[in-house]
Image (cartoon, helix red, strand yellow):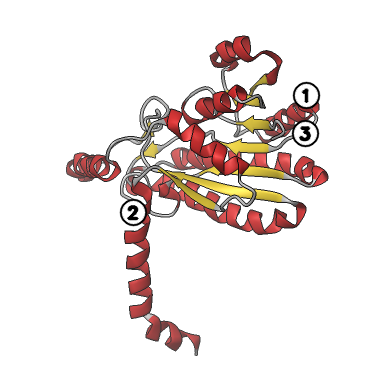
Amino acid sequence: MAAKVWFITGASRGFGREWAIAALERGDSVAATARDVATLDDLATKYGDRLFPITLDVTDRDAAFAAVAAAHERFGRLDVVVNNAGYGHFGFVEELTEAEVRAQLETNLFGALWVTQAALPFLREQGSGHILQVSSIGGISAFPLVGAYHASKWALEGLSQSLAQEVAPFGIHVTLIEPGGFATDWSGPSSRHSEAHPAYAALHEEVAAARRARLGTPGDPKASAAALLKVVDAEQPPLRVFFGESPLGVAEKDYESRLATWREWQPIAIEAQG
């Protein structure tokens, strides 16, 4: 199999770092972005010119376009574009400030959009490519305390499903990666939290405990790399794929409930037709 050229955002830690290492280990080249490229120094030393570190804040549209163009100029093509940069914001909906919600959307949604738009002309011209959007089980289901995060990922899901249909004629694939709980710092140092409202004080710990029980044992980001390579190398990759054991059960329960409710209320839907 010919070596691929990757563009990965948020490559300093977690999924982004493990996936960059997996690609480099098998002989691929990686343009790896991070807010602080010093976090990539060890990889640059080990892999040399096959790693191209790029300083990038994905919320800066002009910088995203410049970063993608620089990667294409460096390697001559782009095969796999991974929109991984993002974080989780914790806060009940009433607790969220305007700035917090806008910041969540700017990174998780608009950051992925800017990089995607920047890459598409290159992918269309070469008639191939694979865009991987790191979503979440929280992109198709929703739970208390992370409403802003869900808003960003549900929007990314809809955007990407439309995108997949638009770019298929150009030989470009789109895949939404939907992880469950993994041992990354998504809910640790990278996360942000709203100021707690007194009315929700008792609910915070209750919701946190329910979340821990729902997610179970965290997945291993290192193991996810081998799974990702199988998705990337597939002749017909999926539009959506879960990472981890727990998401399928969550999705089945949620969608069974939705279908039951929709069927129950179908007479009202028909009445509304007129």
Front residue of 242 and 68? 242
Residue 28 location (% of width, % of height)? 66, 27
Identify the residue at the far top of this view.
45
Asked where in the image residue 123 lies, by quadrant, the reply is: top right
Residue 269 location (% of width, % of height)? 43, 82
Residue linked to disc 1: 74
Residue linked to disc 3: 77
Q: Earlier in the sequence, mark 2 or mark 3?
A: 3
**Is 92 situated left or right of 74 in this image?**
left
Quadrant of image for the N terminus? top right
Residue 91 location (% of width, % of height)? 34, 41
Q: Residue at x 49, y 86 (%)?
A: 273
Q: Residue at x 70, y 49 (%)?
A: 172
Question: For numbered disc 1, what is the local secondary structure?
Answer: helix
Front residue of 14 and 147? 14
Which mark identifies residue 268?
none
| Rendered position, 70 above or below 152 | above
Residue linked to disc 2: 250
Bin the neighbour count of mark 2 within 10 Å (Cα to Cα): few under 14, some 14-19, many 20 and up: some
Front residue of 38 and 205? 38
The alpha-carbon separation of the residues under discs 2 and 1 comes to: 42 Å
Residue 254 location (% of width, % of height)? 34, 60
Q: What amino acid type should be assigned to the residue bearing mark 2?
A: Val
Q: What amino acid type should be assigned to the residue bearing mark 3?
A: Arg
**Is 108 situated left or right of 248 in this image?**
right
| Rendered position, 41 above or below 227 | above
